[in-house]
């Protein structure tokens, strides 16, 4: 479901419904004003919205320990009452997210969640929406506010501009997702499992003749189709041969730093990148999937992408991987296998993904972990980077726009940006950078 749909799990964030951030805080609308009448009409024929409104109102009242919206003004203007409310809210959040820490620990966690919320916005400012970074810059007062009570009170404070009040609400929502992700990571011990996964690779998978972190620099010299920029031919070159090349249009030189593993006495080179999503990327994934539960939406917390010379080397690596797990005293099973390296199309379910992406994809269950593996040959890896309508940079942009996340985070009535036009422009720019650089 698109995140902008009225049945979205994030309805309270939408600017075309009963939770719209208007020119004035909702607290200041007279009960019989035009705005109040319009707001009531928006709820009139939608029982689900009525239920959601009552739930949100109840959460605000419980969180602030009040029984009516009028009491919010007292908290805004009374520093002592505000401090009491903040201390009480920290206890509630501590128990809700199972932080189980001292007041200082709770404050640290809340600051971390606020930083993650800001990182979500700043990551889009730095890449997908980079040309519009000034348009979507976070209001200074919101970026420096880290306490949920302060952010909630800003929503009802008439001294704050509409954009600042929307960003306060947005930050609250993103902080809530960051807190859920942190709780999930603590419950599953993801940090320890990640360290264990790296130890497994270093102790049992990679060649013992190499020191940890010893990588051989190689280059993929490739020629690409003028029709869709797919890879037509690829050769592996050493550093000296690569430096002597002069590239023509349609040719690319791609650096890869390769490890190796032993198979029947042979050293087989393999390029590997470990994939561990930072908190901001996990928050964005929850938004794209219209979910608040990390356990159901973020299934690829641990991952590895590998690139080998041939399909034969891919098969050798798979066998080596399962044997290595046994040596580490753990049986390994491969789950949810999708193999399109030797033909066929990948039937991706994610919005914005391409069915033309060849890869071997599976989840490996071992040692109490479930790790996502994506395996490429040199050719399929280059298509993953460069091919039109397949390249990952294009896919990353498409999913932010096509899922509605860009409009959700930066609604047009506040930021005055046309996301459909921006998507077209940004995809064209990304394609130009891919093919010309």
Image (spheres, helix red, strand yellow):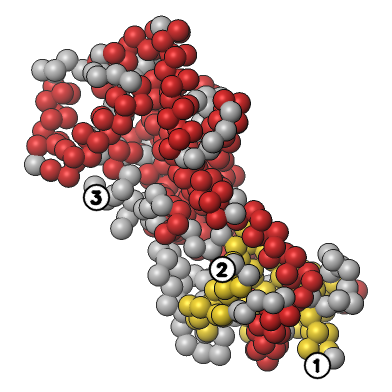
Dot placed on the residue nearer the N-terminal end, 3 or 2: 3
How far apart are the alpha carbons under marks 3 and 2? Answer: 32 Å
The residue under the point 70% across, 63% down is 196
Is the Cβ of the residue at disc 1 closer than 8 Å to that at disc 3? no
Q: Is residue 330 visible?
A: yes
Which percent across, then down, holds residue 194?
66, 59
- What crowding class fits label 2: few (fewer than 14 Cα within 10 Å), some (14-19), or many (20 or more)? many
The answer to which quarter of the image holds residue 272 is: bottom right
SS class, disc 3: loop
Dot placed on the residue nearer the N-terminal end, 2 or 1: 1
Which percent across, then down, holds residue 405?
41, 49
- What crowding class fits label 1: few (fewer than 14 Cα within 10 Å), some (14-19), or many (20 or more)? few
Q: Which residue is mark 1?
A: 264
- What crowding class fits label 3: few (fewer than 14 Cα within 10 Å), some (14-19), or many (20 or more)? few
Q: Which residue is mark 2?
A: 370
How far apart are the alpha carbons under marks 1 and 3? Answer: 57 Å
SS class, disc 1: loop
Dot placed on the residue nearer the N-terminal end, 1 or 3: 3
Which percent across, then down, holds residue 79?
45, 8
Q: From what the image shows, is residue 290 above or below residue 377?
A: above
SS class, disc 2: strand
* Residue 7's disc number: 3
Residue 175 falls left or right of residue 57: right
The answer to which quarter of the image holds residue 385 is: bottom right
The residue under the point 61% across, 73% down is 366
How far apart are the alpha carbons under marks 2 and 1? Answer: 28 Å
């Amino acid at each position: 479901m698109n995140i902008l749909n009225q049945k979205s799990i994030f309805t309270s964030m939408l600017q075309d419904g009963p939770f719209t951030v208007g020119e004035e805080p909702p607290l200041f609308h007279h009960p019989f004003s035009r705005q109040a009448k319009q707001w009531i009409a928006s709820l009139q024929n939608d029982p689900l919205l009525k239920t959601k409104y009552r739930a949100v109102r109840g959460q605000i009242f419980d969180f602030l320990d009040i029984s009516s919206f009028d009491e919010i003004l007292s908290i805004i203007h009374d520093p002592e009452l505000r401090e009491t409310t903040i201390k009480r809210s920290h206890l509630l959040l501590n128990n809700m997210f199972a932080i189980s820490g001292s007041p200082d620990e709770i404050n640290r966690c809340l600051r971390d969640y606020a930083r993650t919320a800001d990182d979500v916005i700043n990551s889009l400012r730095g890449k997908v929406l980079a040309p519009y970074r000034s348009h979507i810059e976070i209001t200074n007062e919101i970026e420096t506010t880290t306490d949920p009570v302060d952010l909630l009170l800003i929503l009802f404070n008439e001294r704050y501009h509409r954009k600042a009040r929307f960003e306060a609400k947005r930050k609250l929502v993103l902080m809530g997702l960051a807190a859920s992700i942190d709780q999930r990571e603590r419950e599953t011990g993801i940090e320890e499992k990640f360290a264990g996964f790296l130890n497994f690779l270093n102790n049992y998978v990679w060649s013992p003749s190499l020191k940890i972190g010893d990588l051989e620099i190689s280059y993929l010299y490739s020629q690409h189709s003028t029709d869709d920029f797919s890879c037509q031919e690829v050769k592996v070159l050493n550093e000296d041969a690569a430096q002597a090349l002069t590239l023509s249009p349609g040719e690319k030189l791609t650096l890869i730093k390769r490890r190796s593993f032993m198979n029947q006495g042979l050293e087989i080179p393999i390029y590997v990148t470990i994939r561990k999503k930072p908190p901001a990327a996990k928050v964005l994934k929850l938004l794209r999937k219209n979910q608040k539960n990390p356990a159901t939406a973020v299934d690829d917390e641990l991952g590895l992408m590998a690139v080998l010379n041939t399909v034969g080397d891919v098969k050798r690596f798979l066998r080596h991987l399962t044997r290595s797990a046994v040596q580490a005293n753990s049986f390994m099973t491969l789950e949810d296998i999708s193999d399109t390296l030797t033909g066929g199309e990948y039937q991706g379910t994610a919005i914005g993904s391409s069915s033309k992406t060849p890869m071997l994809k599976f989840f490996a269950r071992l040692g109490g972990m479930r790790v996502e593996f994506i395996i490429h040959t040199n050719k399929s890896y280059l298509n993953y980077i460069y091919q039109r309508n397949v390249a990952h940079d294009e896919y990353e942009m498409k999913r932010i726009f096509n899922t509605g996340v860009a409009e959700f985070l930066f609604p047009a009535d506040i930021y005055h940006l046309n996301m459909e036009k921006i998507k077209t422009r940004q995809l064209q720019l990304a394609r130009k950078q891919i093919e010309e650089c």
